[in-house]
């Protein structure tokens, strides 16, 4: 009897130990991921010599507002921040909607040259973005869009990865029976897409939104090429201005600006993460 009890306890004990190691591993991974952001904040709250301190500083200082004041003296930081919010939001909304629409068409409709077109879309992902800069710049110049928000927003309104991502998700998540039921109820193509497909694919749309917002927010090369007026600068170009200092690099100032510029990304990530969870639990049963 006692042997039977012991044999039953051993697997439970082993399971508890495995869970403890698993949670410790996850906590360690989270700490490693968070540490660079925390250290950036620490350097942003110390003077310009804080980055070179031995041993490295691990506690915040009291210089953040002084450092950030120098940021405001060197660049129009909040205007650049607003420009990035405008561009990233406009591009993200457009990409999520248009890529979902295109992915839905590729996944659930039959039309001539469907496979050829989809292969062409995938093939564009193999072309480095830098190769398209020159022809894209010429097009923007012909349209007189140089040094305007349109040059940042319009070329990025749809992308191949978004179409591929949404097509793959819709293929498995949106069942043909739901579409047929919508047609029997008298729903048109767009109504079925909006009322049936969209609620089901909300998690994929949220994920695409996060990835695209981060990509546009962090983009430096194309804004550098197409923007001339500092009033139109995005946040990445504004941060680049802080590296031109005759007296040497002020890492306290740079890190305070970088920390502040990263906060919108964290806010968007947290908001979209909640949306993903809500979509996973309720999206498939919405009517």
Image: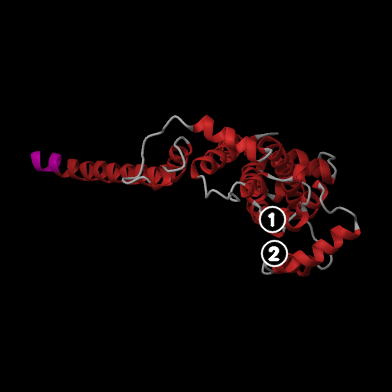
Residue matched to label 1 = 167
> Viewer-proximal residue, 56 or 91?
56
Residue 45: in sight, yes or no? yes
* Pointer 2 or 1: first along the chain: 2
Circle 2/circle 1 CB separation < 8 Å: no
Q: Does residue 89 lie above or below 111 as drawn?
A: above
Q: How far across and how far down the image is residue 181, in percent? A: 76, 43
Q: Secondary structure at mark 1?
A: helix
* Quadrant holding the N terminus: top left
Out of 180 and 234, give the one closest to the viewer. Answer: 234
Q: Position of residue 191 (x, y in %)?
A: 82, 40
Q: Find the magenta span and give its range.
A: 1-6
- Judging depth in this view, the residue of 249 and 155 nearest the camera is 249
Q: Is residue 3 magenta?
A: yes
Q: Which corner quadrant of the image does residue 285 belong to?
A: top right
Q: Quadrant of the C terminus?
A: top right
- Residue 207's disc is none
Q: Is residue 101 left or right of residue 267?
A: right
Look at the numbered disc 2 and give the secondary structure of its residue. helix
Camera sees residue 1: no
Q: Residue furthest left?
A: 2
Q: CA distance from mark 2 to mark 1?
A: 22 Å
Residue for point 80% across, 46% down: 149
Magenta stretch, main secondary structure, is: helix
Residue 11: where, in percent of width, then height? 22, 45
Label 2: which residue? Answer: 129
Which is more toward the observer, 166 or 225? 225
**Badge 2: few (under 14), some or many (20 or more) residues near its Cα, within 10 Å?**
few
Considering only vertical position in the picture, is 132 above or below 177? below
Question: Was residue 153 drawn as part of the magenta stretch in this picture?
Answer: no
Residue at the far front: name it: 247
């Amino acid at each position: 009897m006692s042997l039977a009890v012991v044999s039953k306890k051993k697997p439970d004990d082993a399971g508890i130990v495995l869970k403890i190691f698993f949670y410790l591993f996850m906590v360690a991974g989270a700490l490693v991921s968070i540490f660079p952001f925390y250290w950036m904040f620490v350097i942003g709250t110390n003077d310009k010599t804080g980055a070179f301190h031995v041993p490295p500083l691990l506690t915040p200082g009291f210089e953040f507002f002084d450092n950030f004041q120098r940021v405001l003296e060197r660049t129009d930081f909040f205007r650049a921040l607003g420009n990035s919010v405008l561009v990233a939001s406009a591009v993200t909304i457009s990409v999520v909607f248009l890529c979902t629409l295109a992915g839905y068409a590729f996944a659930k409709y039959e039309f001539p040259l469907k496979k050829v077109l989809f292969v062409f879309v995938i093939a564009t992902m193999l072309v480095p973005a830098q190769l398209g800069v020159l022809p894209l710049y010429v097009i923007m110049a012909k349209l007189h869009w140089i040094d305007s928000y349109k040059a940042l927003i319009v070329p990025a309104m749809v992308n191949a990865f978004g179409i591929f991502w949404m097509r793959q998700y819709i293929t498995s998540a949106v069942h043909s029976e739901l579409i047929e039921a919508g047609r029997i109820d008298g729903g048109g193509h767009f109504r079925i897409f909006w009322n049936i497909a969209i609620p089901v694919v909300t998690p994929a749309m949220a994920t695409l939104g996060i990835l695209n917002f981060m990509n546009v927010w962090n983009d430096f090369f194309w804004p550098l090429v197409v923007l001339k007026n500092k009033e139109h600068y995005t946040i990445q170009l504004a941060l680049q201005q802080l590296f031109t200092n005759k007296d040497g690099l002020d890492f306290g100032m740079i890190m305070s600006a970088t920390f502040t510029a990263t906060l919108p990304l964290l806010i968007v990530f947290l908001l979209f993460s909640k949306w993903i969870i809500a979509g996973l639990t309720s999206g498939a049963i919405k009517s």
